[in-house]
Amino acid sequence: MAFARYRAFQLPGCPLGFGRPQQGRGQIVQRRPGQLMERQRPHQIDGQEAQPRRQEPVDHPFAQAGRQPGRDAVADHLLHYAVGHPDPATFDAAYRQLAEFHDETWERLGLTPEQTVLGGFSMGSVMSYALGLGPGRPAPAGILAFSGFVPEVEGWRADLPRPSRVFIAHGLADPIIEAGFAHRARRLLEEHGTDVSYHEGDYGHWIEPAHAAAAGDWLAETLLR
């Protein structure tokens, strides 16, 4: 299994604890892909109660630091939000900025939401769901979601049904965002009559070439309707 290796340093006066080396402060940290610091409470995937993955103990400034303002806030933030449940403050900021960008782009190019497909990979697909299904937001022609999830976050709820078509592709071996999130998205959408094109396969957290080709065909069909 491949490892991601990096060196973490503490910077005096920096609340995040990173920066130039300080004598005696550098540590080597190893992290396997997919091991995330997550909210330690049960949540539902495919109707089953599951515990979020826990990160193995590491010699890291966030994990080993004393109680200091700023750095503790970052550590607490990382520990309290799980995959599928974005931090409300950062989600809201990104949501508002993307909404403004979409509105400005449609006006500048003389296009309409009905001539647009919102799409992305991983968190890009999460925000495509968020803006494509968001309350008060116009329905695009389609949503293209690679390896993502419909967010569950305070202050946001999917506005369904709506006429947008949805393409979902997800790896069954995805260690970052489990395939159960794709199954839940599909079920939610189809329960409200959404036209969903669903694809999955035995791969990880990436875009499978065969599914990229299928997405191209779906995109052409969606925009030419």
Image: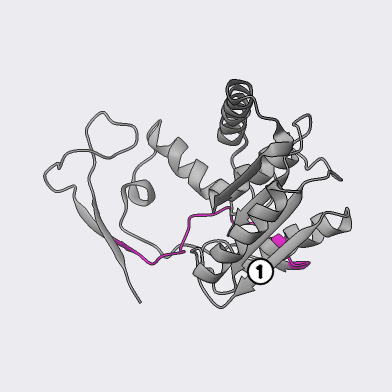
The picture quadrant where one finds residue 75 is: top left
Along the line of sight, which residue is nearer the eye, 43 or 90? 90
Please name the residue shown 62% across and 32% down the image. 95
Number of marks in picture: 1
Disc 1 residue type (three-letter): His
Can you identify the residue that label 1 sits on? 199
| Residue 15 drawn in magenta | no
x and y percentages locating residue 142 in the rendered image? 71, 47
Q: Which residues are the magenta region? A: 30-48
Horizontally, is 151 left or right of 73 in the view? right
- Asked whether the viewer can see residue 154, the reply is no
Along the line of sight, which residue is nearer the eye, 118 or 11? 118
Quadrant of the rendering where the N terminus is positioned = bottom left
- Up the image or down, 10 lies above or below 28; here it is above
Mark 1 element type: strand
The picture quadrant where one finds residue 111 is: top right
Please name the residue shown 58% across and 21% down the image. 108
Q: Residues within 10 Å of mark 1 (few under 14, many from 20)?
A: some
